Structure formats: C-alpha cells, structure tokens
Amino acid sequence: MKLTNKIHVFTTVLFIVLLVFINAAIYFSFSRIMYDSEIEQTKAQAEQVQAGISAVQSAAAPQELLRAYVPPSGMIKIVLQNGRGDATVTGGSEQRLVEEETEFFTEERAEVRSIDDIPHAFISLPIVWTEGEVAALQLTESLEATAENLSVLRIVLFVVSIAAVVPLFISARILSKLITNPIHSLIRTMNDIRGSGRFQQIERTSRSKDELDQMTQTFNQMIEQLETNYEKQEQFVSNASHELKTPLTIIESYASLLKRRGKNDEALFDESVEAIHSEALRMRDLTQQLLLLAKQDEQGNLTLSANALSPILEAAASSFERAYQRKVIQHIKQELVVTTDPQKLKQLLYILMDNARKYSEEEIVIEVGQSDSLAEIRIKDTGIGISNEHLKKVFDRFYQVDEARTSTSGGYGLGLSLAKELARVLNADVSLSSEQGKGTTATILLPISN
C-alpha cells in the first residue's frame, strides 16, 4: 500500500474510532444523568406518599391518598409481607402495570426496570400500613418520554458523525497528498539523477520551515555537497594524472633513448639514468603526498593529549635546521599547554616551514602567543609573498601560485592541502596572510588545555 493511502486510511479510521468513542461516552453519560434525575424525582413522589399515609389513621384515607398521588403514567401499589398486593392505583392507560409480578422488599430500593421494552422508574419504600403492619410502598412510573429523548439524541449523534466523516475523508486525502508530495518530488529527482547522471535539486515551493521543508533543504544541501566533492574529485584525478604524466613521459623518452643509443654513448647513458632516477624520486614524493592527503580522514591513530608547546616547537625547528641548513628563530612569549597530537603537529609545522623555505632565502621566524583561549603559532618568512587573488586558493589541492617554478621548488600543490587536513584533525585552524615582496605568515590556532 502506498504511503498516501496508508496516511489516508489510518487518519480516517482513527478519527472514526475516536468519534464513535466520544459519541458513546456522551450518550451513556447523558443517559445516566437523565435516568438518575428521573429516579430522584420518582423517589421524591414516593416519599410524599409515604409521609401522607403515615399522617392518616383509617384504611380508607390512605386508599384515597394513593389515588391523589398516582402519576398519570404510573402505578402505586401497597405490597404486604406475604407478597400480595393490598392496594393498587394506576394512572392513565397504565393498567398493564397491574399484571406485573409483585415482590415484597424490606429495604428501600430505587432502579430502572424495562417493562414491555419501555424503561420505568421503580421505587420501593417500607411503610406502616393499617393495623400497624409493615408493608412496601411501590411506585412505578413510565420513562417513555426520556427514552424518546435519548432516541433523538442517538439519531443526532449519528447524523453529526456522518456529517463529520465526509469532510474528514476529503481532508485526510488532502493531508496525505500534502505530506507525500515532497517525498514524491524527492523520488523523482533521485530517479532523474540516477538516469541522467546529473546532479539536480528539488525546487522548494514553500518556506514553511516544517520537517518536510527541512528534508527538502537537507537533500538540496547534500546534492550541492556531493556535486562539489565530485567536481573536486574530478579535478583531483585530472591534476594527479597531469602531474604523473610529465615524469612518466620523461622516463619513457629517456628509456627509449637508452634503448636506441645508450650502449654507444656513455654521456647519454649517464644523463638518461640521472633523469630517470630524478623523475622516479619526484613520482615517489608525489605518491607519498597523495597517500598522506587521502589518509587524513582516518583518525584511528590520533592521540590527543595535553602537551607543552615549547618542546614540540624546539624539536621540529631543530630537525628542520639539520635537514635543510636553514636558520629557524623562535620567539616564545609564554609557556603554553595545548591539547594536540605531538607527531601530527610536528608534521603540520614541517609543511609550513618547508613552504617558507621554498619561497624565501633568509631565516624562518616562529612566534608563539595566546589569543583568548587559543595558542597562536605564527611561522613567518620574508620571501616573495602571495597576491590576494591566489591567497584564497592556496589550500586547494594541486593549486600552485607559480607553475613555472614547480620543478625548481619541488612543489606539487599538495602541501597546504595536507596542512589544512591536519589542522582539521587536530581541532585547529590554519590560515595564511601575505604581502607581495615582503613575505608570508602562516598562523596556527590550537586549543589550550585546561
């Protein structure tokens, strides 16, 4: 069964059940109130008769009193202890009540009895009859008018229920359509995406801010993110293919050259071997950077803990100075303890210091300070700088400010992308500020440990 039909049927059936329950509760409550009211009135009449009989002494006077108090649609009967009726008076056309079975009750009794399918109020009160004998005064009164009123109430409730179900049936259909339309639109869009291979978004026809509108908005955001990631993936594959194609072409060219003339020309042999070795190293470095970049989403080896910042900076700077023979000056204003993974933080520092080394000739400066509840690490160089146009894109994969110098600087446009991913894993933030001709500053913001 379709969701539209499920909502329609469930809503309609539930409302009908609730309506029947409410109507039944109304009917039985009203019926009980009306019958209790009639019983109280009949009991009051019987008590008046009881009081009148007690006030007279002769046998004839109580008999006349019974005739005076008998209701138009009822009967008054005096029942002796042996179960025999001693005096019976009926009103109107209620002679059939005389034929009802007589029973003596010693205690007071008030109830509704059905006689010939008509409800009657029955009251039995003990009285002192003639000659001091204890008897039962029994007053029976027809409640036919009350039964007719309740019958009218049943008809009214039934008609009202039918009148309520019809618009409910229509409104439930409209409601089910309203709920499922965005879902149908979502299904159509997903089928179109699957069939055409193109990313599409659902058109938002309203801004109701309900769950259905939020579902539509979330789906559109997901499609937008998938489209962005797909474009980045295509760009990544294209750039990676381009970067790998160049060294492979060089290797293939020198290998062909060696195959043709390498045996007879020693100088050509040495040149070819050196070129092949150099390009193989470049391919190895590029592959390693690609693998590192791809693994940054895997945080299984991440160990965040409280660490003093100075020893990490000193170790990273010392290793960098020995590897590249470049001076690294540290300005640490205060000792800070940060929550980080020391090894990954060192990797992040190496990337930024190496980037400063490639595009500057003088010493590299590391400054440490505090900004609110964050530790601030600034890595400065006095190199050529980066223009604002390029500064916005330097964290994109394979983006290079100057492609002509790639082979001399040894860059592939992956270092800053890797730095951005490392910062994200460390719950840190990394940014660049630069001025052409004056240098570049890389800033790392790390959470200070409590």
Image (cartoon, helix red, strand yellow):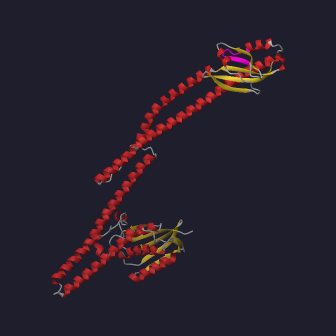
Q: Is residue 313 left or right of residue 263?
A: right
Which quadrant: the N terminus?
top left
Q: Residue at x 42, y 70 (%)?
A: 441
Residue 37, visible in the rendered structure: yes
Q: Is residue 70 magenta?
A: yes
Residue nearest the observer in this picture, 228 or 157: 157
Which quadrant: the C terminus?
bottom right
Magenta-drawn segment: 68-77
Residue 384, visible in the rendered structure: no
Q: Position of residue 211 (x, y in %)?
A: 45, 47
Q: Is residue 320 above or below residue 238?
A: below
Q: Is residue 431 above or below residue 29?
A: below
Q: Is residue 285 left or right of residue 88?
A: left
Q: Position of residue 123 (x, y in %)?
A: 71, 23
Q: Is residue 322 above or below residue 38?
A: below
Q: Position of residue 62 (x, y in %)?
A: 78, 14
Q: Position of residue 332 (x, y in %)?
A: 51, 75
Q: Is residue 8 above or below residue 55?
A: below
